[in-house]
Amino acid sequence: MQMQTPEYVDQYMRDFFNGNTRRVDEECLRSMIDVTLRNMIHTTGWLPNTEERCELLASLLPDMLMDMIANGEIDHTVGDGWVITYLTNIQHTQEYELEDLTEYLDIILEGVPRITINSLQDLVKLVDKFVANSKESYLYPVSYVYDPIAMMSCGFFPTTDNMNNKNSDTYFVDYINLMDYSSIDFWSSNSTQFEEDCNVSDRLKLLTKQMRWKYSTLQQHKTNAIETADSLPLLLQAPDMLYKGSKRPITDMSLFRSSISLRTSSPIPQGNLVTTITLRNAKVNVIPVTRYAAGMSKGLYYNNRPANICGTFYYHEPESTTLLSFNTYRVYKNKHEACQDLDPSYARLFTKYTGIKSGQSVYYDYFNGYLPGDLMMTPNEAFAAYKEDSDIWDKEMVDALPQVKHMAGTYLGLYAFEDKLDQPICLAAKKLGIDVVVLTHMVGRFQVVTEVLDTRSIEDTFASLVYTF
């Protein structure tokens, strides 16, 4: 009789693996997990709740997988080497020390032929093979890489968590830009992702021992960039594919174009945020924009657009060849200011969605102009502006850092701080008959950007795009 896997195990597998186990024998893993849990509960008499069981699974599964590899029950190549990446990612939990895990992986893979990249010559030979293959593929198991940045410049990216996603963390970009490790640790220290462990430089130093790398062709990186706005691979390999100013990926927005799309051959005046042109014998306002998505109903932060969502966001992009046309609009510095103008219950609304009261946060220092508009600050300036005590850094330590200006939005907790105000602003503007809300000082992950919120339906906003070629 086949063992029935409990629902909490199924849910854990779905959540934890996120589809990466499609080529792994999931039934085998589920059975091992189930038996282990049942035996432990039977032996100890402990009756854990669902959350406790999931925590237990997180601590048990790595040991199970490593034992299965060591005993030959699972081939390390299964799932294009997925198991290696999973075990490497355990470094993000508190159960394992980084060096200990790396040493254990070395032990269980003993006897397996390993790839060593000791020089540029080794890397060139490797690149030739993968370019000839001309498709996305994985390189593993790797024992040593002489220069991780050179690897990435050639199209290979590490598969470790937070080093291969669409919003590559600022610490990783800083590493690519050759920032010293102490400064990387400082600028990462207030990231919510690293509250428990701000010393991210330890993870970066282990890139030379990264066991699995993903290779993508330049065309694949370009396609991914247009869908996700991830510009890092193009910055390293093809900077001409990025807008010169914003460094975002160049896109013609053809995804949203059809045979009936609006077109204009008229020159667009430069220098103005919003300008007026004649389109089909009528005067309309336009703003150059760009948008990144994998589909018409998709966005950067969702796969399928919820039916009740109000509005569509674009980036203002002065170099774009695509314009958004509209009749009515308002321009605000940020969502705080938009709320203040659009909704009479602003104070209650802002407190409800952000959890802070007027004058209570570093956010108000930024809103009131006490901080630089672009948030480019030295470590000393950012440390002085931060409103909470640091358990990790003191003034003497910060004084010792190179005082080079860096975008301080994430450090100060301002990145994405206002996102919960999107829907209230959109609904309030739409109620007042405002087509577009332009927000000129929105704190992004890497820079302060101008966002364009179209309050119209998704069908109407895409039909209002104007192509200039």
Image (cartoon, helix red, strand yellow):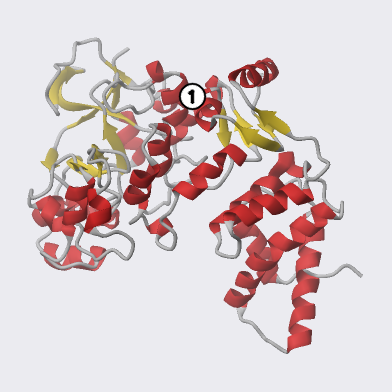
User: Quadrant of the image for the N terminus?
Assistant: bottom right
Q: Nearer the viewer, residue 73 or 19?
A: 73
Identify residue for label 1.
222
Whether 463 is drawn above or below 269: the answer is below
Q: Residues within 10 Å of mark 1 (few under 14, many from 20)?
A: many
Left or right: 463 in relation to 135: left
Q: Quadrant of the C terminus?
A: top left
In the image, residue 99 lies at what x, y percent? 61, 53
Report the residue at 59% width, 27% height from top. 216
Counting from the top left corner in percent of width and height, residue 17 is at: 64, 54
324 over 353 or under it: above or below: above
Asked if residue 74 is positioned above or below residue 137 in the image, the reply reads below
Q: Nearer the viewer, residue 308 or 388?
A: 388
**Residue 91: x %, y % from top left:** 58, 55
Q: Position of residue 206 (x, y in %)?
A: 56, 44
Query: Nearest the camera: 361 or 253?
Result: 361
